[in-house]
Image (cartoon, rainbow, N blue to C red):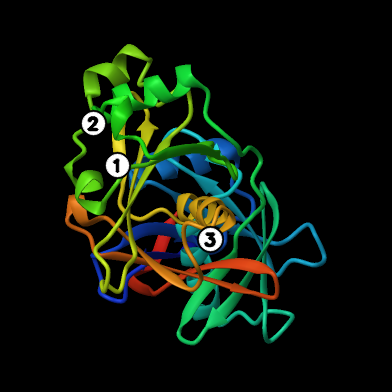
């Protein structure tokens, strides 16, 4: 075993323990895949990341992203948290105005927005209307009637999101997922697709929408506290169809005691998804 720099970063919050944590191993060179997967299961966080030397000369670093059950090509809050930890460790990007992350999805651009970090929303792999069967299954998992759905779309930028819009933030927060329906679909979530739900907050509130995210974790249905990939995909959908205008702030985590805030902006023709980050634990991991 070797001592490896290790950090846990809270993402989409400036106040520790109010956002979404990610575990970051800052030097994962030489570790085999089964040890990466085992450590991610042990941390039992939604994601654990492992920083490696880049294979693409345009990248500043490479990251592999693991849930307790699988490896992901991309995820939003681990991208911000890993970049925060990498910079805090004293690393310097090739460009003063950009940090370039290499991951399973390819190269992801990051930039500083004042004291925040933001990533460029990756292109959608799948978009467009949701078929009636998939939407019915999603409604069953969410425990809502089809009449409650204002709109729905595929918003897959890696994890496979199916997005559902309801009329208000109150309706978003009132959702009580039907775990039996989820189990009936093999923890369903429309096959392997996680579900995001969004609704408008009251006018005058700093956050204009409330977001919730439900996904499969092993054999259980889980709710993610604050989700960068989902908010990136929602931004492409809702800005694209004129429902929202940038810049805006999304709230997520309210239903489970978190106070996540996701800042969305458009610059240089690109959607940027940002948030505050703060280190909660720093030390070493014996791996």
Q: Please rate how many residues cluster around mark 1, counting C-alpha atoms within 10 Å: few if below 14, some from 14 to 19, many from 20.
A: many
The label shown at residue 262 is: none
User: Distance between the Cα atoms at labels 1 and 3?
Assistant: 19 Å
Residue where numbered disc 1 is placed? 223
Residue 145, quarter of the rendered image: top left
Residue 109, picture quadrant = bottom right
Q: Is residue 181 above or below residue 142?
A: above
Tell me the mark number nearer the camera, choosing from 1 and 3: 1
Q: Earlier in the sequence, mark 2 or mark 1?
A: 2
Q: Are marks 1 and 3 in contact (CB under 8 Å)?
A: no
- Rate crowding at label 3 as few (under 14), some (14 to 19) or many (20 or more) other CA atoms within 10 Å: many
**Residue 287 appears in the figure:** no
Q: Quadrant of residue 187?
A: top left
Closer to the chain start, of discs 1 and 3, is: 3
Nearer the observer: mark 3 or 2; the answer is 2
Whole-angstrom CA distance, mark 2 to mark 1, is: 10 Å
User: Residue drawn 53% across and 40% down?
Assistant: 159
Residue pointed to by mark 3: 79
Q: Position of residue 278 (x, y in %)?
A: 36, 74
Circle 2 SS class: loop
Is 201 rendered above or below residue 105? Answer: below
**Is the C-beta separation of discs 2 and 1 under 8 Å?**
yes
Mark 2 sits on what residue? 177
Q: Relative to residue 22, is residue 147 drawn left or right? A: left
Identity of the residue furthest to the right in this view: 57
Q: Nearer the viewer, residue 145 or 126?
A: 145
- Camera-near label (2 vs 1) is 2
| Front residue (pair 164, 287) | 164
In the depicted view, which residue is nearer to us: 180 or 60?
Answer: 180
């Amino acid at each position: 075993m070797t001592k490896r720099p290790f950090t846990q970063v809270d993402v989409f919050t400036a106040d520790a323990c109010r956002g979404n944590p990610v575990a970051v191993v800052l030097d994962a060179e030489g570790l085999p895949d089964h040890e990466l997967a085992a450590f991610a299961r042990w941390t039992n966080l939604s994601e654990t990341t492992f920083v490696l030397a880049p294979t693409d000369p345009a990248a500043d670093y490479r990251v592999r992203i693991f849930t307790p059950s699988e490896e992901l090509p991309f995820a939003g809050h681990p991208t911000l948290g890993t970049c925060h930890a990498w910079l805090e460790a004293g690393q310097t990007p090739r460009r003063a105005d950009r940090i370039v992350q290499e991951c399973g999805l390819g190269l992801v651009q990051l930039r500083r927005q004042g004291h925040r970090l933001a990533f460029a929303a990756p292109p959608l792999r799948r978009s467009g209307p949701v078929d009636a069967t998939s939407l019915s299954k999603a409604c069953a998992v969410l425990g809502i009637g089809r009449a409650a759905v204002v709109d729905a779309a595929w918003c897959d930028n890696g994890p496979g999101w199916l997005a559902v819009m309801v009329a208000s933030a109150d309706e978003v927060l009132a959702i009580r997922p039907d775990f039996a329906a989820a189990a009936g679909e093999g923890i369903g979530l429309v096959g392997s697709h996680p579900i995001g739900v969004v609704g408008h907050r009251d006018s005058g509130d700093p956050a204009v929408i409330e977001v919730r995210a439900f996904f499969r974790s092993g054999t259980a249905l889980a709710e993610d506290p604050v989700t960068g990939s989902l908010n990136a995909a929602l931004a492409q959908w809702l800005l694209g169809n004129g429902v929202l205008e940038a810049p805006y702030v999304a709230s997520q985590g309210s239903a489970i005691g978190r106070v996540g805030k996701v800042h969305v902006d458009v610059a240089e023709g690109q959607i940027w998804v940002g948030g505050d980050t703060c280190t909660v634990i720093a030390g070493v991991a014996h791996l």
